[in-house]
Image (tube, grey):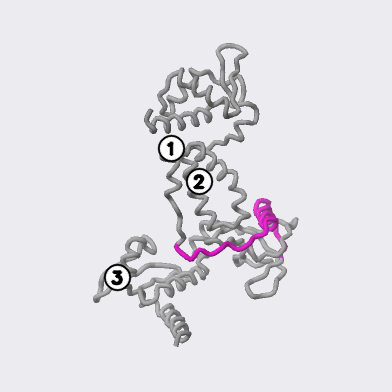
Amino acid sequence: MPKSANYLALERQWELLRILPDRAPGCTCRELVSRLEGIGYGVTKRTVERDLSQLESQFGIRCNDASKPYGWHWLPGQKESFGDVDLADAVSLSVAEGVLMQMLPPSMLRVLAPKFEQAREKLKSMSGHPIARLGEKVRYIPASLPFESPHISQPILETIEHSLVSEKQIEVQYAPLNQKPKNLKLHPLCLLQRGNVSYLLATTFDYSEKLLYAIHRFESVEVLDQKATIPEDFSIEGYLASGGMEFGSGKMITLRVRLSDTLATYLAETPLNREQKLQHKDGSYQLSARVHDSWQLQFWILSQGDGIQVLAPKSLRSRISKELSKASRQYA
């Protein structure tokens, strides 16, 4: 028999296990044939009977032969351990695991561990199927250096999550970078993941300004009885649209830059935004785009070296010029 037929048989048997009910009296073979046909598997009653006979020795399924017509079903508690991940989901989860392992701290990955394990078991059981092997041929490579995620205390993260769900204030001891720990009272708004660093967005004491606090810098967290004050107009989408996670004031500027041919080609393929304008002018490529004036923008410009020259606004051009001059003196 051709291998492709074996692959189809494996996939069909897995789907058969998925559609089996989790209690007696179960489904008859004729009912199972009908259900399989409904999802694209044309099989005979005899094929289903043979599949069930083979699967009974490997999985917790049984035939209810107390009365006719006989029905097949899972034994109590067995279907839950079998999981509900199909082949396509398993491949997607295996690829996603590789991505998230490089982005999320271990404390957050633990929540997803059961699903990843189900995916691995599914791919293992169908290792001969061509689709199951797709996960071996897909890898995620970060665009930046592969930094390690900072350590996050699991109890502290769980306490913060509890405060978000209950919408309660928290009293914390927080250690800003290169500073002594501070005692703060925070009103939690949301958790945000930027690269491999997790942040809590919150207001502090009775102030309305929204500030970011790196989760790994919390030394202690206690949930208080008082309700957190959450601005009526607050939304995560609105905060992100304002450029908050770019570490800036949210001010919009019209950026005009001169680009090298290589960087112009790159930005033509992966633009800063949909409204950017790129044209060849005065012997070089020039780009204009509305962007947030932020630390992230400045960091990106500096990372392009001599491939970019800021033309406007003048304030940004001046800041970049000063940073490059300081950097040049380091190598003088």
Q: Position of residue 10 (x, y in %)?
A: 46, 31
Q: Which residue is mark 2?
A: 93
Choose the circle earlier in sequence order: 3 or 1. Answer: 1
Marker disc for residue 53: none
Q: Is residue 203 left or right of residue 316?
A: right
Q: Residue visible at 51% across and 70% down?
A: 248
Which residue carries the number 1 mark?
A: 129
The reply to whether discs 1 and 2 touch (Cβ–Cβ < 8 Å) is no
The mark lying in front, picked from 3 and 1, is 1
- In the rendered image, which residue does mark 3 sit on? 261
Label 2 CA crowd tier, 10 Å (few <14, some 14–19, many 20+) = many
Read off the magenta span: 143-172
Residue 312 in percent (x, y) is at 37, 77
52 within the magenta span = no
Q: Quadrant of the C terminus?
A: bottom left
The amino acid sitting under disc 2 is Leu
